[in-house]
Image: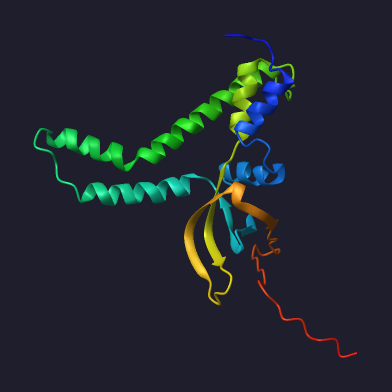
Amino acid sequence: MSEDPLAPADQDLAALGSYAVQDGFLLDLIMLADSGISTSVGLLVNGMIVLGAVSPPSLAAGEVDAERRRIVGLSERPEEMSDDEWESARERFAEANRRALDRTEDARNRLERDVELYGGGEPIDEALAPAMLTRRLIGHRARPFLTLCDVQLVAPGNPGIARIAVLRVAVSQIGAWWVIRHDETGRASFPLFQVEEPDAG
């Protein structure tokens, strides 16, 4: 494996290919959520206003796996399988997304250790680092989807608010976003629309 650093053109291609040109501020909030630190945000997505708390992808994985578990619960054991084999197959099917997420987290932990070893605890210069390490770092930063929980969604022309427990949003579809600040008690409020009173003067 070559230890030569990536050429500048290769760095640009890798960044474009992995969505590493995303908004760094938003990526920071997503990475904080990976560590269990949640932030409330508002998003403008295809004309809709979406409010929610940035959350780790494990919430979305749990939602999908819950549906997989429901599906497998409706299935009957194939005749060629023993009870133990069937139970093992059911668990593999029902926990597929959690297992995939665990593998992703393991890969990120290995990357962090490799960066620590290479840089000696200091930030590394990607222009000088080995090509494969730089590629892995670029891939680690990529976040094509955002997970939100406790979501409120307002659509144009609809006076109501849709409430959704967990929502996945394509980052590429976010036209604008903002942080919803909390007060000293930890509560947050955001008035969606306010009617401005006409100036009496």
> Can you say which quadrant of the picture contains the N terminus?
top right
**Residue at the image position 50 percent from the left and 55 percent from the top:** 167
**Of residues 119 and 97, the one drawn nearer to the viewer in this rendering:** 97
- Give the left or right position of residue 51, taking residue 57 as reference: right
Q: Is residue 92 above or below residue 197?
A: above
Q: Residue furthest left?
A: 79
- Give the left or right position of residue 143, taking residue 197 as reference: left
Q: Is residue 37 visible?
A: no
Q: Is residue 148 visible?
A: yes
What is the quadrant of residue 145 in the picture? top right
What is the quadrant of residue 131 in the picture? top right
**Of residues 88 and 146, the one drawn nearer to the viewer in this rendering:** 146
Q: Which scheme is used to colour this image of the protein? A: rainbow
- Give the left or right position of residue 170, taking residue 95 as reference: right
**Residue at the image position 69 percent from the left and 57 percent from the top:** 179
Point out residue 71 in the picture as x, y percentages from the top left corner: 26, 50
What is the quadrant of residue 178 in the picture? bottom right
